[in-house]
Amino acid sequence: MKYRITAATAVLAAGALSLSACSSSDGGSTDGASASGGSGDFSGQTLTVMHYEGDESAMGKAWNKAIEIFEKETGATVDLQNTAFEDLNASAQQLFDSSDAPDVSEYNKGNGTAGQLAATGVILPLDDAYAKYGWADKLSAGVDTIAKYDENGVMGSGSWYGVPNYGEFVFLYYNKDMFDQYGIDVPTDEASLEAAMQTFVDNGVTPLTTSAQEYPMGQLWYQLALSKADRQWVNDYQLYENPVDWSGTEVSTATGTLEDWVSKGYISKDASGMTAEDAGLQFINGESPMFYSGSWWYGRMLSDVTTFDFGIANWPDTTLTPGSGGNIWVVPAQSKNPELAEKFIDVTMYPEVQALLGESGGLPVAADTADITDPNAKQLIDLFNEVNDRDGLAFYPDWPTPTFYGDLNSVMQSIVNGDATTDEADAQLKDYYESYVSTVN
């Protein structure tokens, strides 16, 4: 197998987003006037915008604000098309290259998703727009990695193909009331985490809700691997610098731990058929004391958790954790209004839109942090900066190949269902991974 070393290596090693360093003194204003892009008159035109954020999420609130400003500033009308992350992940290759393509869309970042579409010409390069609007100046190194792809679709170098305007990472949500009820402290290492989970099991409570059908359990698997990994392992896994040892400590520990946790009742066998929404609702409804998932849930937790107090904590005793810049805005090759699409993207970077995102529980990349006063928002930012201070952002497990998201989910389901041992599961993952990586020269 040939492994390709890219310029992204240096970016990945150097880059972590620190919100406190990502302020912006130019861009939009409350009346929608952009200092960088100009307004223009697009009256009578319609821009089709697609995204998969809920109205009550931090991003959903921010994008609705952006639509309001955009329509006022340009005179154009937005045709908003909401979709599901899973649906777009499966259909983007065909949709974006068809007459039904939206003009601009939120899309998943990484080699196997945006990278593949960039390499095959399904999304447009945005180099001219980056120069026009000055977006690169608003993105720190850990964020801009996911916006650039080379001719093979490998992130970190090449042309700009997307615009990330928020950050994200994965951490532990926990039910403070349930922890207090059973006299459990917030875990500080793996031993205390497993002791806490055993205490819950002893009291008839399944401690950790997750979904093997969708992304949460795959991200948990990756976190367990990262807890035994270093930055070089991440570079090997994500950027193909060296072969990944699929029987090594990182992978075998992750898979073996999950197999063990299922057998001990720390994770319910129901997780095999549960969606991310199912798992999140179990936590929101107070049925589970712990949920390991992303910052994209935080705004919803603040609004929907009403019967107990919850806390947030980084995974105990680890340097590396899943996270990156957020999903990116892309312009499909079949966009009917690419210029207008770029204008809309720029509006999402306006300070008032970014500040709303932060106040609503998101992690903006181009906000003036002085505009963010909400204590809950600051709590999330502080937790995120803990990861950044240790250069901890390690991207996501499904990024290396176009099919690894579904591949990983299917293996997670096999573990929960008892259909595969640790060694068998790791061998399956190795085959899925290497069948694609061997083609990247």
Image: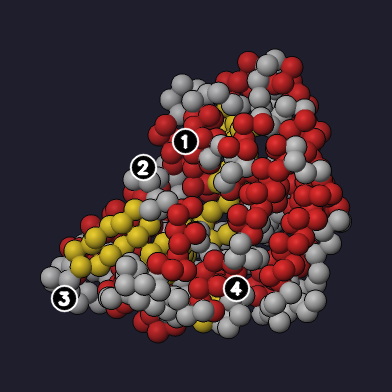
Residue type beneath disc 3: Asp
The residue beneath circle 3 is 41
Residue type beneath disc 4: Met
Residue type beneath disc 2: Glu
The residue beneath circle 1 is 301
Local crowd size for mark 2, using a 10 Å CA cut-off: few (<14), some (14–19), many (≥20): some
Q: Secondary structure at mark 4?
A: loop
Q: Earlier in the sequence, mark 3 or mark 2?
A: 3
Q: Along the horizontal axis of the image, is 177 left or right of 39?
A: right
Q: Along the horizontal axis of the image, is 373 left or right of 168?
A: left
The image position of residue 325, as x and y in percent, is 53, 61
| Picture disc at residue 176 | none
Quarter occupied by residue 391: bottom right
The image position of residue 310, as x and y in percent, is 54, 29
Residue type beneath disc 1: Met
Q: Secondary structure at mark 3?
A: loop
The residue drawn where x is 46% and y is 21% is 307
Q: Are marks 1 and 2 in contact (CB under 8 Å)?
A: no
Local crowd size for mark 3, using a 10 Å CA cut-off: few (<14), some (14–19), many (≥20): few
Rounded to the nearest whole Å, what is the CA distance between mark 1 and mark 3? 40 Å
